[in-house]
Each structure stands twice: as structure tokens, then as C-alpha cells.
Image: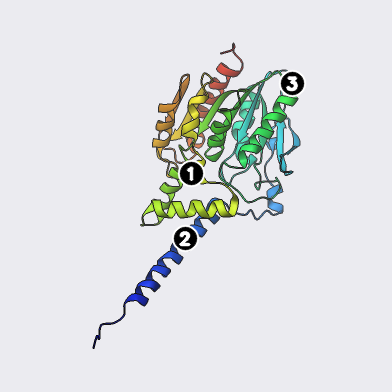
Amino acid sequence: MNNRPNVLPFVINAVAGAAGGALGLAWYLSERINPVPNQTYADRYTFTPWELGADSESITLHTPDNLKLSGWWLPQPASQSVIIGCHGHIGNKSDLLGIGARLWNAGHNVLLFDFRGRGESDSWPNTLASRELDDLRVAIAYARERMPDARLGIIGYSMGAAIALLVAANEPSIAAIVADSAFTTAADAIAHGIRQVFPIPVNPLLLLTDAVIERRHGYRIRAIRPVDSIGQIAPRPLLFIHGANDSVVPPEHAQQLFAVARHPKELWMCEDADHCGAYFVDRNAYVERVNAFFAQYLTSVEL
């Protein structure tokens, strides 16, 4: 008689449990990457350009899929330059009021807007540099319609920086880009975040998360690769800014982007700065650096 226990049910249960746990974790990550915004009245109770003494008007942008995006236009009627600001993944346009007001003071028209699902824009599940590409294209179209002869610049932060790089690669009207805390690929940035929290193999979980996101939101995080597009931006200039202590997007991302970008290009690694923190480490130095870059490439002679 064979008295050995039948281990097959235990194996099946263990495999099913592991698979269920992995799927649950992938679902959780998809929620973190693509949160459904819980917009409240507080989204309307923010600082505006008025608090900083900047002239402004509220504008509404319309996306191809019939969403309304909220924006501020800071006019300088005598200027022939427009700078568009792109906030980060879970931020909004008010995050850019500091640098936006300073760029306006320097003589540029400035356009700040909320990506879909953020701030005062229409509610929509956040994606990661996917549908937001269309949002930036709409903002560019608005600026070009309003100032047909203006030279356009973009300043973007984190996800907004990645979006700026991806769009600029195929949008020749963008004359200069400042990319603060940009990532090389979305997959690499997310993998870094997973490693900080979960002591498990990253690649299988990332593949499963990617599949869940494609099923739920219709895009692949592995397709978001600014590093592959950045070489198409030249001869338009790039200024990369990155915190040397960035805990969200490692500094190596900026170094890799800089390495594959073509001239003209600059890289400023800011000591003591974490993610998107260079502005806060030294506001004067940051504003001077960004203003000098845009002054050189938006208000000087053609490249």
C-alpha cells in the first residue's frame, strides 16, 4: 500500500495562491500608476497667477476625445515666444506657478494647463504619458493659433518632461525643451519603484502589470520610451535638469538621456535635490538657468 501523501493538491493550491497574489499585486500597481481622480471642490481652491501678480486669463482646451482641459494663459503681447508648462503625474498646473510666473516676468507668454483627470480638467483615469500626449498637442495647437509667429518652448517635470520629449520628437514647431527629472522609459522608472517596496523579482511582475494596464486602460507602459525618441529632437536644444539624490527617477536616467541626445544639449545635475527638487534647493539659480536657456534659444537668432 502506498501511504505517501498526495502532494498535488498542495502544489496546485500553492501555485494558484501565488498566481492570485501576483495578479492582485499587478492590479494594485495598475491602480497606483493609473489612479482614478477623486476630484473635489478643493481642486478649484488653489493659488492662481493672481497671487503672484501675473496677468492671466482662464482658458479651456478641447481634446480630440471631447474632454475639457483647464488652463491659464499669461500674456506678454509684445513677446514672440510662448513657453508651455507640463506638470507631473499626479500634479496640476498650480505646481508650476513659481517657474511660470518667473518666465512671464522674463517676457514670455506662458501657458499652464491641467492634464486630463488632474486639477480642474475633466475627470479621466490618469495614464502615464499615454493619452496625455494628445493633451500637450492640444496645448501646442492653442499656442500656435493664438501666437502664429511665436517660437515655442516647453518645460516639463517628471512625467511632463517625458511627454515633452515624446511630443517634441515629432513636433518641429517646438524650438527648445527643458526636461526636469525625466525618465528614460516608463518601465525602468516603475521597476525602480517596485524594487524600493517589494523584495520580489521585478520583471515578471512588470510584465503582468503591463498586461493589466493594457486591458484596463488601453496602453502599454513598455511602449513609453523617451530614450528612443530623443535623438529626433536635434538640432533643437535640450536642457536636462535632475536631482543628484532623486529617489523616484534615478540620476542615471538623466545621464542616459543626455548621452543619446544630440547637440545642442546641456545637463545640470543638482546636488542635494530629490525628485523635481532642483527648483526648491536654489530658486534663484534655477530660474536664472532656465531663463538663460530660453532667452538664448527663443528670443535670439534662429538656429
Q: Residue at x 55, y 28 (%)?
A: 169
Measured in 3D between alpha carbons, the distance from the residue under mark 2 to the one under mark 3, in whole angstroms, is 52 Å
Q: Where is residue 129 in the image (x, y as percent from the top left)?
A: 56, 41
Of the residues shown, which amino acid type is indicated by label 3?
Answer: Pro
Measured in 3D between alpha carbons, the distance from the residue under mark 1 to the one under mark 3, in whole angstroms, is 42 Å
Figure label count = 3
Q: Quick check: can you spot residue 196?
A: no
Observer-nearest residue: 176 or 214?
A: 214
Q: Where is residue 38 in the image (x, y as percent from the top left)?
A: 65, 56
Q: Relative to 273, does residue 9 appear above or below in the rendering?
A: below
Where is mark 1, residue-wise? 222
Q: How crowded is mark 2: few (under 14 residues within 10 Å), some or many (20 or more)?
A: some
Measured in 3D between alpha carbons, the distance from the residue under mark 2 to the one under mark 1, in whole angstroms, is 18 Å
Where is mark 2, residue-wise? 25
Of the residues shown, which amino acid type is indicated by label 1?
Answer: Arg
Observer-nearest residue: 138 or 275?
A: 138
Q: Considering the image in quadrants, where does the N terminus appear? A: bottom left
Q: Where is residue 289 in the image (x, y as percent from the top left)?
A: 51, 24
Residue, far front = 1
Q: Residue at x 35, y 72 (%)?
A: 11
Q: Considering the image in quadrants, where does the C terminus appear? A: top right
User: In the image, is 127 to the left or to the right of 2?
Assistant: right
Front tag of 2 and 3? 2
Residue 77 is labelled as 3
Observer-nearest residue: 210 or 265?
A: 210
Mark 2 or 3 closer to N-term? Answer: 2
Q: Relative to 76, does residue 1 appear above or below in the rendering?
A: below
Q: How crowded is mark 3: few (under 14 residues within 10 Å), some or many (20 or more)?
A: few
